[in-house]
Amino acid sequence: MGTSTGWTIDRRRLLTLTAAGVSASALGLGGSRQALAAGETVRWVSPRGTIEVLDDYPYWVAKKYGYFGDLQTTLEPGPLEATATVKLVDQNQADMGYPSPGVFSLALAQGIPLVSVFEMGGADVFDFAFQKGKAPSDLKALEGKTIVLGSAGWQAICNPLLTQAGVDTSKVNYVEAGNGWAQSLAQGQADSALSWEGLRAQWKGQGLDFDYVLGRTFSKLPANSFVIRKADFQDAAKKKVYAQYLRGWAAGLEYGRQNPRAATHIVMLQFPGLASQMNPSVATESMMQLGNVFAGRWPERQKWGFHILDSWQLFLDTSAKIAQIP
């Protein structure tokens, strides 16, 4: 599931990073639920704090055309807090999460037994936004400057990415601004903001017009992947359910690659409010930004969900270089 070699990425392949986490109870998300309860329901949780975005177009395509078969599925927004998605999976508040490699390693360091089963993108999805006319030719210019984040935990995303660009991350300042982090940059309260493909088009549609340094132009690090509990991966019946579920996502990804405008239209119908944030042209641009990342490094992958293990090793080596992992 996820790689042609049958490898998955778990604690043995990702070294650990010690960091404080957040419990599901602290997030106010109620009591535990039975994982994959009667009726075979798969509950997926987003790391973004919202599902009213173009990012999850493969899911909505799969729902519309029945690619999940008889599985019952839900897509939950989850809190914006960086480690929430992995905590919710661990505590049976969700069945599948979508963390960044940095957040995934945070969870593994805390002893959370997770397995990455589906690599969503072959190219790095993360970007750095700057006020118009202020994007540097070299990211080393961020030394001594301030980057605004939606969650403090996103530092685990930024530091390996910046290190690849030759930045001394000990000289970078981070500020957490919650859901308003883009507005903080627009108001000049920071020098840069973490962004990602798809989101940058949505920001433009909202009147937040920035210049960018795109991660995929210089980074070889992996993007976010889908993770499940290791116990579920080792359960043959549950593993079969997840395989069926991920085939639905793969079919949705392929649909989007073949017909991006139709995939965009499906999401816009699902969330009519998006029309107030972006016109069809901007929405399609957002979807295609994501599609380019999801299909990134395709000659090396050839399959949806495939993990490029060299890319993950580079993440580990880079993180070790900056002492983000031991």
Image (cartoon, helix red, strand yellow):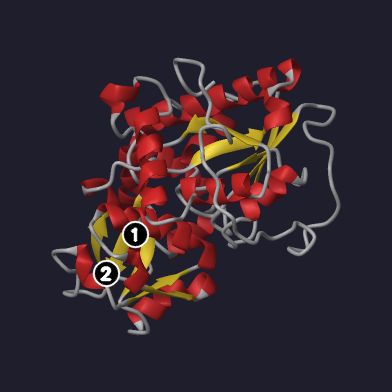
Q: How many neighbours does mark 2 have within 10 angstroms: few (below 14), some (14-19), or many (20 or more)?
A: many
| Farthest residue, direction left | 137
Q: Secondary structure at mark 2?
A: loop
Q: Position of residue 56 (x, y in %)?
A: 50, 43
Residue 228 percent coordinates (x, y): 65, 35
Please indicate whether residue 257 sits to the left or right of residue 233 in the image.
Answer: left
Instruction: Report how many numbered discs are placed on residues in the image.
Output: 2
What residue type is disc 1 on?
Answer: Arg
How far from the left and from the top, in percent, is residue 106? Answer: 57, 51
> What kind of element bears circle 1?
helix
Which of 275/315 is in front? 315
Residue 268 sits above or below residue 257 on the image:
below
Residue type, mark 2 in image = Phe
Quarter holding the N terminus? top right
> Mark 2 or 1 closer to N-term?
1
Q: Which residue is mark 1?
A: 200
What is the x, y in percent for residue 64?
56, 32
Q: Is residue 199 above or below residue 32?
A: below
- Does residue 207 appear in this view? no
Do labels 2 and 1 touch, CB within 8 Å?
yes
The residues tagged by marks 2 and 1 sit, at their Cα atoms, a distance apart of 8 Å
Q: Which residue is mark 2?
A: 210
Q: Is residue 66 left or right of residue 177?
A: right
Residue appearing at x 48%, y 50% in the figure: 325
